[in-house]
């Protein structure tokens, strides 16, 4: 009778030891992948933040001098829009600036008349620059990356009045632009200061979508507030960026109320709930979300590079 021999394992390792080694190798690969994606995100954010603020300040000062030339009282320029909220991204955000009339004879004119005055003064000061007089504001296109939009405004108590959306010859009711800024700052603090960087990253990605499927910068900010007001997940840029596109693709289907009171909704340009326009944008945001999920699932750094290019 022959005795039964012992079971032989390659290298003398038991199944448990082999399993532990495989798990360790997989964990090392996962960590390396996460580091690479984090580096890609950090690079994109650095590029987004790398704008010439000195040049923008120079443009603003020149515009202010032009507007105040020959006017009694003063016209103060105050940043609005994405620049005041530190969410500016070239290619998607305009630099909205409120031109607040302070004890000026222009205060007695209609918004349209004030806008025409602004256009003439800026045209005289910047004769070779592309300047457009729109329905409510004057837009100065300094480069293909950004424009400065000058919107007439009247100080009224704790709020301001701007040209009415329905009639540019009338001043609007009192609006509170600071309310939105305060809410954004509060939600950003709740999320360990990571919301504003994530909004910048989201804007950068959205700016690469076809024009009809892009969102306004203000709308992206409002979606950021909606998505992260009660967020309890990981406070990393990658996790939050994935969460933004997953949730934003759903929330974009419904209008978001404008906290400033300037309009009823921040996204009127997408029309009613579940409109064709909203569904198109939702589909694009959902596609970005799926690409991120697939890139993570296959540990494909090239796919993430394509998303963040």
Image: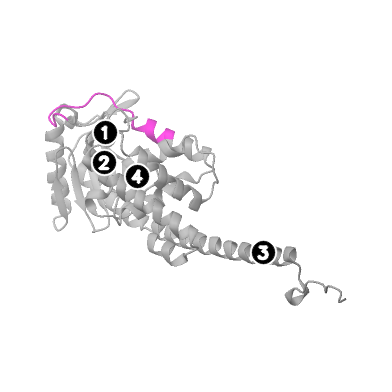
Query: Which portion, as a residue range, is magenta?
Result: 166-183
Pointer 2 local density, CA inside 10 Å: few below 14, some 14–19, many at least 20:
many
Q: Earlier in the sequence, mark 3 or mark 4?
A: 3
Q: Is residue 12 visible?
A: yes
**Considering depth in this image, is 151 or 245 the residue closer to the camera?**
245
Tell me if 54 is positioned left or right of 42 in this view: left
- For mark 4, what is the residue? 82
Q: Earlier in the sequence, mark 1 or mark 4?
A: 4
Residue depicted at x 15% and y 55%? 130
Quarter of the image where the N terminus is located: bottom right
Q: Distance between the residues labelled 3 and 1?
A: 49 Å
Q: Where is residue 111 in the image (x, y as percent from the top left)?
A: 16, 32
Question: Nearer the observer, disc 2 or disc 3?
Answer: 3
Q: Where is residue 195 in the image (x, y as percent from the top left)?
A: 46, 44
Residue depicted at x 70% and y 63%? 20
- For mark 1, what is the residue? 273
- For mark 3, what is the residue? 24
């Amino acid at each position: 009778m022959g005795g039964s021999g012992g079971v032989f394992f390659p290298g003398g390792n038991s199944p448990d030891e082999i399993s532990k080694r495989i798990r360790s190798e997989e964990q090392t690969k996962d960590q390396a992948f996460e580091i690479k994606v984090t580096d890609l995100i950090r690079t994109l954010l650095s590029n987004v933040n790398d704008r010439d603020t000195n040049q923008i300040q120079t443009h603003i000062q020149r515009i202010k001098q032009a507007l105040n030339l020959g006017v009694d009282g003063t016209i103060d320029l105050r940043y609005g829009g994405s620049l005041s909220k530190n969410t500016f991204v070239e290619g998607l955000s305009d630099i909205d600036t409120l031109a607040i009339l302070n004890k000026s004879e222009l205060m007695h004119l209609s918004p349209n008349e004030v806008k025409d005055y602004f256009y003439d003064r800026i045209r005289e000061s910047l004769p070779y620059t592309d300047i457009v007089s729109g329905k409510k504001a004057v837009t100065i296109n300094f480069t293909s990356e950004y424009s400065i939009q000058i919107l007439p405004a009247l100080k009224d108590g704790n709020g301001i009045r701007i040209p009415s959306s329905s009639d540019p010859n009338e001043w609007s009711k009192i609006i509170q632009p600071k309310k939105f800024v305060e809410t954004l700052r509060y939600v950003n603090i709740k999320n360990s200061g990571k919301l504003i960087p994530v909004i910048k990253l989201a804007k950068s990605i959205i700016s690469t979508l076809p024009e009809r499927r892009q969102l306004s910068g203000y709308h992206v900010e409002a979606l950021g507030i909606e998505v992260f007001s009660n967020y309890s997940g990981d406070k990393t840029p990658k996790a939050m960026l994935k969460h933004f596109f997953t949730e934003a693709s759903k929330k974009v289907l419904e209008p978001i109320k404008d906290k400033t009171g300037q309009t009823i909704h921040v996204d009127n340009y997408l029309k009613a709930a579940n409109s064709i326009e909203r569904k198109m944008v939702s589909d694009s945001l959902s596609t970005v979300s799926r690409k991120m999920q697939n890139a993570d699932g296959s540990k494909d750094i090239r796919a993430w590079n394509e998303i963040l290019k």
